[in-house]
Amino acid sequence: MSLNRRMFFMAAGGGMLAANAAPSNQVVLGVIGAGGRGTFVMDTFQKDPALRVGAICDVYEPNLERGLSAASKVQGKLPKAYRNYKELLADKDIQAVLITTPEHWHAQMILDALAAGKDIYTEKPLCATPEQGVTLLEAEKQHPKSVIQVGMQRRSYDLFLEGRDIVKSGKLGAVRMVRSWWLNNYLGAKNAVKLDGPLDWEQWQGPAVHRPFDPNRFKYWRYYSDYSGGMMAEQGVHVFDGIELLMGASYPLAVNASGGKAHKGDGMDTPDAAVVIAEYPEDFIAAFSINYAAMHYEFNNDQLNQLDGDKARMDIGRDQFKIWMKGAEDQPAVEKKSPKGFLWATDLHVQNFLECVRTRKTPTAPMRVAFPAALAVQMAKMSLKQGRRLKWNAASMKVEA
């Protein structure tokens, strides 16, 4: 029996190593979803010496075992193991939860975590439909004691915060358009023929339309509209949130999207390439292009936001920004590079959340701040399906044709 498997059964049976005396500011975290992103963010949480992972839940046994192993290597003791997230939420030892499941589960898990009185750090997008987002905003008001952070890490990133201040200062002049792009390639990924261990398929599907078991749907869920808005939504929500931060923007007024085919095949129905135009009441438009059938770029070069002002243009990407002044386009007048790089943004965002858990302050990305970007990409998904421009009525909080 492998070490990971032995650890899994020990944790599932309640066998845990003796805990050291907990510091007074210790936060006990429960992790719901221990896939690649979930384990990465959990590792970021564990950089805080007063953070203890008390429990991990996953419906896919290899992920659960991997999460238990990763947590125990840092803290020297095993978290509890759960296969049903509601059992984790009922655990009185857990103060805060990290939700890193597929998009189609986010809204229900957030609502259940709020009902259980937990603090919440959830990955994006916040919701799978505009209606879910409105429900979540109401729940946020009804549970003011819970600290909620959505994983829009640019909200805590020093580079983007400085970029926001530059826009606000008027250095760029009037910015009427922001052009953004994200390029990558996923077409070479091999289809999933079988999984590496047991999966509770029915529980994984949860609130989505239930389909016959398909390992591809589990492995590549982002490319199926049953579970996601595709890469247009998964990456676009970060882009639109960054734009809204930089521009001090609120809800989009209207969204229109066009998309190409899904070339990866096997029933995947979200486009590889798409263009989304969002109109904002702050008198600018945001044009976002995504192409996951392009050439593969290095991590620091695969995305960029270009703010077109009438005095200057600012290009801001993952780890640097540059400003070109009118009449001097050959050489940037200002260059700034983040000393720690883009991955540091997640560290800063997690640090902000944990500080707020301890002080009960409001974090940088509560649901009311994160919803407008989720709304933009979910309206884009609707626009693709309906083939038309859609409007947002901020008074009634509804999408209109």
Image (tube, rainbow, N blue to C red):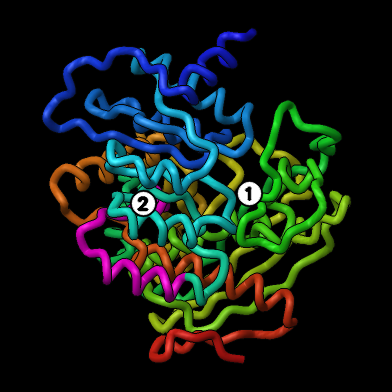
How many angstroms separate mark 1 from mark 2 (CA)? Answer: 38 Å
In this picture, residue 91 sits left or right of residue 65: left
Q: Name the amino acid, label 1.
A: Gln
Q: State whether residue 119 appears in this view.
A: yes
Q: In the picture shown, does residue 18 fall above or below 292?
A: above
Taking the spot 45% from the left edge, 33% from the top edge, the residue there is 56
Q: Which mark is residue 203?
A: 1
Q: Position of residue 298 (x, y in %)?
A: 62, 35
Q: Position of residue 11 (x, y in %)?
A: 46, 22
Foreground residue, 177 or 213?
213
Taking the spot 62% from the left edge, 56% from the top edge, the residue there is 206
Q: Which mark is residue 78?
A: none
Taking the spot 37% from the left edge, 48% from the top edge, the residue there is 121
Mark 2 lies on a secondary structure that is: helix
Q: Which residue is mark 2?
A: 160
Residue 274 belongs to magenta span: no
Mark 1 lies on a secondary structure that is: helix
